[in-house]
Amino acid sequence: MLVLVITNDALREELLACAPADDSVHFNFIQHPGHYQGSAAPDACIDLLFDNTTDRINWLNGLGSPLVVINAVAATLAGTDAGFVRINGWPGFLRRPLMEAAAVNESNRNKAEELFVLLGRKAEWVPDISGFLTARVVASIINEAFFALEENISTEQEIDTAMKLGTNYPFGPFEWSEKIGLAAVYSLLAGLEKEESRYTPCKLLEKKALI
């Protein structure tokens, strides 16, 4: 099985963190679509650097791969391509033994589950909504942490320490924001704000994200 993966080094390491050794699977890692020189269509394509542009979507469809998996946390399949499978590939999330995913095509869902098994993951299917479930929660926690910082309730380090010790989270909210990228967190919150005001980004978070 040939799996084409568009990724950077950090996400590549996370993706393979749980993958068992399997000689039947061959990964072709590239960092940009233009780097692909394969003559045959891959059996699956995982785009961990997906940007929701028409050119990118057309290129992925043009591969002829029977399964395309995209790392699209904020964008839904309705806003990208209903024939794809979405995963939550935010940095830090790919290391989990569960793969949070969304699909509207049952055939693609079955193919994706087979691929996830080869990666040492179990699929956790969630609705095709912006932010999935966990990204919404983590983004909200980060947002509340910035409100607390803005109001001088505590420091970044103290808030991170309190969250890790009090809730057993692997990272504090500011550590999460640095790992994920504050711009990605802000983009998700700004989009969700159009649905519900409780996702309105903190002004301090917005300011730092747009620097």
Image (cartoon, rainbow, N blue to C red):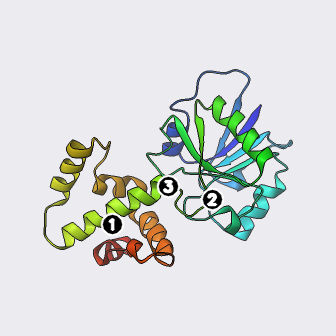
In the rendered image, residue 182, in percent from the top left (x then y), is placed at: 39, 64
Residue count near mark 3 (Cα–Cα under 10 Å), binned few <14, some 14–19, many ≥20: some
Q: Distance between the residues labelled 3 and 2?
A: 10 Å
Q: Earlier in the sequence, mark 3 or mark 2?
A: 2
In the rendered image, residue 209, in percent from the top left (x then y), is placed at: 37, 71
Q: Is mark 3 on a helix, strand or loop?
A: loop
Is 157 placed above or below 30 here? Answer: below
Identify the amino acid type marked 1: Asn
- Residue at which label 2 appears: 128
Q: Earlier in the sequence, mark 1 or mark 3?
A: 3
Identify the amino acid type marked 2: Asp
In this picture, residue 166 sits left or right of residue 15: left
The answer to whether mark 1 and mark 3 are in CB contact below 8 A is no
In the rendered image, residue 211, in percent from the top left (x then y), is placed at: 36, 75
Residue count near mark 1 (Cα–Cα under 10 Å), binned few <14, some 14–19, many ≥20: many
- Residue at which label 1 appears: 143
Dividing the picture into quarters, in which one does residue 147 lie? Answer: bottom left
In the rendered image, residue 144, in percent from the top left (x then y), is placed at: 29, 65
